[in-house]
Amino acid sequence: MYEERPSPLVPGAIVWRRTGAPGGPVLPDGCMDLLWVGGRLLVAGPDTGPHPAGEVPGGVFAGLRFAPGTAPALLGVPAHELRDRRVELADLWPEPEVRALAERMSAYEDPGAGLERLARSRAGRSAPHDPLASRVAAGLRSGESVAAVAAVVGLGPRQLHRRSLDAFGYGPRTLGRVLRLQRALELARRGLPQAEVAHRAGYADQAHLTREFRALAGTTPGAYAAAYAPDGAAASAGDPAGGSAAAKRETAQPSGSSTAA
């Protein structure tokens, strides 16, 4: 079972929880997550491709998914250093501090609430995140070109690339591809025809959609729809695969929700 909710304590963040066997692979979404798994605090960095589920055994996973570009300031490390990685929080923060935090986390009946409070407390002692990150992410999410986003934020291509590496873990072109994939996944979960998915998500054509799906999700749009899309049902906002569990073979998980290493 997977469930999520917006965090009232950490702006833009999502609190999620998964119980039971892991579902499908973790797919890139431009986000970073703080995880609580089996008494351990971990960080899921930004992904550039599908990440296999179930690398860490456990029946309950809790996470706090940060909005794109907001986690590096809180964690104290540039996003590109955690790209495609799952690391112990103690590798980033002093071990005694993390040990104390884990003891506090163990006392929470709802681990997600504990992660929220941990992040809020840390944010009060951290530098603010890059103010350009939200504008860059919003522009690319809406389908604006990298050149258009760079012009709006007043940066040259090299400056934008450097700032994006620190904030998102990769350059703006890759972030744009990841966010476009997320738009396509949303449409595919609704059971829309591939040609319509390609058009509405902003791909040049259906062949372009298929190439990007293979590169970023490790599958084709047709295989993804067969595995995860509901049978004629609209996607459910609370379920990353949309629809009821009976309508799909397994659940595609968001960033960091199934696996850590």
Image (cartoon, rainbow, N blue to C red):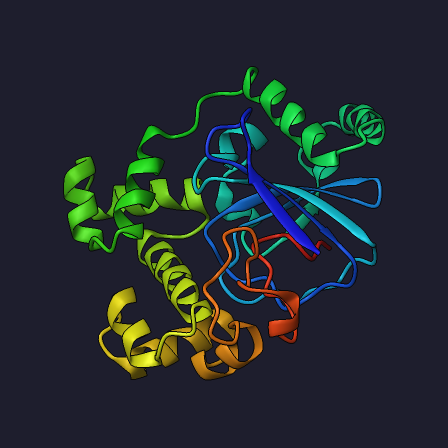
Q: Residue at x 62, y 54 (%)?
A: 85
Image quadrant in which you'd find residue 112 = top right
How many numbered markers are drawn? 0
Outermost residue, front side: 233
- In the image, 219 versus 75, the foreground residue is 219
How far across and down, in percent of the image, does residue 46 sit? 52, 51
Outermost residue, top side: 124
How far across and down, in percent of the image, does residue 122 sit? 61, 21
Residue 56 lies left or right of residue 112; in this view the side is: right
Image quadrant in which you'd find residue 54 = bottom right
Q: Up-down: is 251 above or below 128?
A: below
- Image quadrant containing the N terminus: bottom right
- In the image, 5 versus 70, the foreground residue is 5
Q: Up-down: is 211 above or below 107?
A: below
Q: Residue at x 28, y 37 (%)?
A: 135
Q: Residue at x 69, y 64 (%)?
A: 53
Residue 69 lies left or right of residue 20; in this view the side is: left
- In the image, 163 versus 257, the foreground residue is 257
- Image quadrant containing the C terminus: bottom right
Q: Up-down: is 254 above or below 78?
A: below
